Image (cartoon, rainbow, N blue to C red):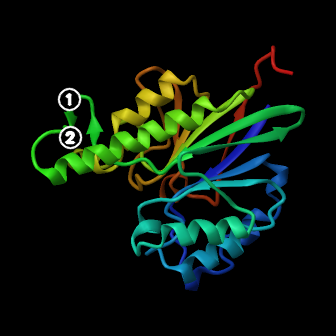
């Protein structure tokens, strides 16, 4: 069994320094890895990102992250990613990483993702230049997730995004904003690539558990949803795995 801890949407500011750390120091008793599903900062400021680094660095388990829309708000996403990486927090954006866990391998592929909506109620690549640019970003992020997942040859594979790959975990949010909370393209990639678990944040008023149309387990780990410093999920290792 590989134990995955995950949380998103912690929205840390400079006044939040030290608030999460006490709950994380004994993380190894509960999990083998910690996944961060984006929106780590409030407004994407570097001073806020330094608080994030202080809270999540030097933990007893590896930490793997994606950024969210808040982390890009001040157009410093690249600088935030570098700061976190310099503090030992792996930041993925169309990339993957493989971790050794108790003689088994865990592969995590990550991308921010984007909005766009879901089957029957989604944006289309048609019309004004601005609309086509919106949908092009949606498709490009999904393609990057597909490429990252295709790199993995591991016992367990996890897709880590900020935006949701399914409507299931958006239940509780106003349906009018579903198109800004996720997209069907991410779900198609998750199902196509044989993922064992998909983890996302972003939907503060959604629900924790759902599945993609193809039946892949999806968990919304936005802190307002899980109402704790992290949630944990046990992932069985296939019997044929080494």
Residue 233 at x, y percent in the picture: 67, 39
Question: Could you tell me which quadrant the N terminus lies in?
Answer: top right
The dot on residue 153 is none
The dot on residue 123 is 2
Q: Secondary structure at mark 2?
A: loop
Spot the residue most to the right. 103
Question: Could you tell me which quadrant the C terminus lies in?
Answer: top right
Residue at 43% over, 75% down: 43
Give the foreground label among 1 and 2. 2
Quarter of the image where one finds residue 57: bottom right
| Residue on which disc 1 sits | 120
Residue at 47% over, 51% down: 112
The answer to whether 224 is drawn above or below residue 215 in the figure is: below
The answer to whether 19 is drawn above or below residue 133 in the figure is: below
Quarter of the image where one finds residue 10: bottom right
Residue 8 in view (yes/no): no
Residue at 54% over, 24% down: 193
Q: Nearer the viewer, residue 145 or 191?
A: 145
């Amino acid at each position: 069994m590989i134990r995955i801890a995950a949380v998103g949407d912690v929205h840390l500011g400079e006044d939040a320094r030290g608030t999460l750390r006490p709950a994380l120091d004994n993380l190894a008793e509960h999990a083998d890895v910690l996944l961060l599903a984006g929106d780590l900062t409030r407004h994407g400021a570097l001073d806020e990102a330094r608080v994030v680094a202080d809270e999540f660095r030097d933990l007893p388990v590896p930490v793997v992250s994606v950024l969210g829309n808040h982390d890009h708000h001040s157009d410093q996403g690249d600088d935030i990613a570098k700061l976190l990486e310099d503090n030992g927090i792996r930041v993925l954006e169309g990339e993957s990483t493989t971790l050794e866990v108790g003689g088994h391998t865990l592969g995590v592929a990550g991308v921010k993702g984007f909005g766009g909506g879901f089957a029957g109620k989604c944006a289309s690549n048609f019309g004004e230049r601005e609309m086509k640019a919106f949908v092009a970003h949606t498709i490009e992020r999904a393609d990057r997730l597909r490429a990252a997942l295709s790199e993995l040859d591991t016992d367990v594979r996890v897709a880590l995004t900020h935006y949701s790959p399914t409507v299931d975990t958006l239940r509780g949010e106003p349906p009018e904003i579903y198109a800004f909370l996720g997209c069907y393209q991410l779900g198609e990639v998750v199902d196509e690539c044989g993922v064992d678990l998909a983890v996302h944040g972003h939907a503060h008023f959604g629900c924790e558990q759902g599945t993609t149309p193809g039946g892949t387990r999806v968990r919304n780990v936005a802190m307002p949803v899980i109402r704790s410093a992290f949630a944990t999920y046990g992932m069985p290792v296939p019997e044929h795995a080494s």
